[in-house]
Image: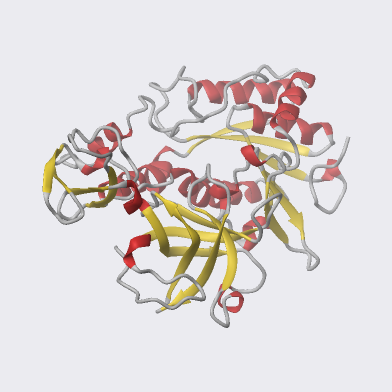
């Protein structure tokens, strides 16, 4: 069997902590490493009150999942620990999620979970347990570079690639992280689970936001921020009132359904004005975005980001949603802030989402980093396209 880790030393003398969520991917990761002779320790995080989500399909890290992770650990004969991270998870992920929606953004809580919990707190725990590396079941590839450091690449199976959610991983963390499934297909993972005799071989993949057991994220927001669903106006691009809404937390940029407005042509949510409790709607073409301004940018390419952008910027390929393929763009620094110019534009770009950089559009491209979208400018706002000078209007924000 091939060696799944790139670490020095004999496998039996190398301790590896595996983050076990109770799903098939992390379970196979643990089983693979155990079969290869590594000293494997499984750790499962209890992240929230799992009573309501106990038997709901599509949720991860719930009570059922803790039970499944423990059963897998018993099956492959490794020690297994459950750590109570509820308060930490609420502070770092759930509270931020709610605050982002109240501010009119569309958050990506999985990124916050990876940054603050899995690749910070859990990584520290792994080191305390004497582990050389922390392994997870993410579909993303980690490869050793000529200088000895590790870089992040898209998974072999494009439709399973999870690199979008890992852009905020640091260079230091990458040297301590391993992703054994990045070079494998999902069908192969399930077949391995059957071969290892794991009961989770046919378990459903997690799909929903794990801490929203009802599937209604607005319930979580209103519980944490009473009054967040204050009513307001639905207006067109000129500010004309077209109707009323029951709270901006019920809307996201690009949304068409649920507006409750009779119009001669389809209308879409173009932006959310949280300060004035307004939902701004317009035609589909108003959703087209050319320029994105970013915050909290993380760079994991070669050198520093400022070195990489010296001379006016560089061409990259970006994803503004996890389900979209990388698209050509120009990354630059302007006025002390990082901006992305989208060569072909994108529809429905919302503040709060992630914009992830790659060095190529296809295959197992290297992840160069990314940032959170702070604001966006519509294509019809006379935004410049790289190489063609045109008047620039202020980016909405």
Q: Residue at x 17, y 34 (%)?
A: 262
- The number of numbered badges drawn on the structure is 0
Q: Is residue 337 above or below residue 8?
A: below
Closer to the camera in the image, 310 or 230: 310
Quadrant position of residue 238 = bottom left
Viewed as shown, does residue 139 lie left or right of 3?
left
Viewed as shown, does residue 199 lie left or right of 99?
right
Viewed as shown, does residue 206 lie left or right of 189?
left
Q: Residue at x 68, y 53 (%)?
A: 153
Q: Name the outermost residue toward the front.
A: 264
Closer to the camera in the image, 334 or 287: 287
Q: Is residue 132 above or below residue 337?
A: above
Q: Position of residue 362 (x, y in %)?
A: 67, 51
Q: Residue at x 43, y 34 (%)?
A: 209
Q: Position of residue 126 (x, y in %)?
A: 64, 47
Quadrant position of residue 175 = bottom right
Q: Residue at x 84, y 54 (%)?
A: 8
Q: Is residue 366 above or below residue 106?
A: below
């Amino acid at each position: 069997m091939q060696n799944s880790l790139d670490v020095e030393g004999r496998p039996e003398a190398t301790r590896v902590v595996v983050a076990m969520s109770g799903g098939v991917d992390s379970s196979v990761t643990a089983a693979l490493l155990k079969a290869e002779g590594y000293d494997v320790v499984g750790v499962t995080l209890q992240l929230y009150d799992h009573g309501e989500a106990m038997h709901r399909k599509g949720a991860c890290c719930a009570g059922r999942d803790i039970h499944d992770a423990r059963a897998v650990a018993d099956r492959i004969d490794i020690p297994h620990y459950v750590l109570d991270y509820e308060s930490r998870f609420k502070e770092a992920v759930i509270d931020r999620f709610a605050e982002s929606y109240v501010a009119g953004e569309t958050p990506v809580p999985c990124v916050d979970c990876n940054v603050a919990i899995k690749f910070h707190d859990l990584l520290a725990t792994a080191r305390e347990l004497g582990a050389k590396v922390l392994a997870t079941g993410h579909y993303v590839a980690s490869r050793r570079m000529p200088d000895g450091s590790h870089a992040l690449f898209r998974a072999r199976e494009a439709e399973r690639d999870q690199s979008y959610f890992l852009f905020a991983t640091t260079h230091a963390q990458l040297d301590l992280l391993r992703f054994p499934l990045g070079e494998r297909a999902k069908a192969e993972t399930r077949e391995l689970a059957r071969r290892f005799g794991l009961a989770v071989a046919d378990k459903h993949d997690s799909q929903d936001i794990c801490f929203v057991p009802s599937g209604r994220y607005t319930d979580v927001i209103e519980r944490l921020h009473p009054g967040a669903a204050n009513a307001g106006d639905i207006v067109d691009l000129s500010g004309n009132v077209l109707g009323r809404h029951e709270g901006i937390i019920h809307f996201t940029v690009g949304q068409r359904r649920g507006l409750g407005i009779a119009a001669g042509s389809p209308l879409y949510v173009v932006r959310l004005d949280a300060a004035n409790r307004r939902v701004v709607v317009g035609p589909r073409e108003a959703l087209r975005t050319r320029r994105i301004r970013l915050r909290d940018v993380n760079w994991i390419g070669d050198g520093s980001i400022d070195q990489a952008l010296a001379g006016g910027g560089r061409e990259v390929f970006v994803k503004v949603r996890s389900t979209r393929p990388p698209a050509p763009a120009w990354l630059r620094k302007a006025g002390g802030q990082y901006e992305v110019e989208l060569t072909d534009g994108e529809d429905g770009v919302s503040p709060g989402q992630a914009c992830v950089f790659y060095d190529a559009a296809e295959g197992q491209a290297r992840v160069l980093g990314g940032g959170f979208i702070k604001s966006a400018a519509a294509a019809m706002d006379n935004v410049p396209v790289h190489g063609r000078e045109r008047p620039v209007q202020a980016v909405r924000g």
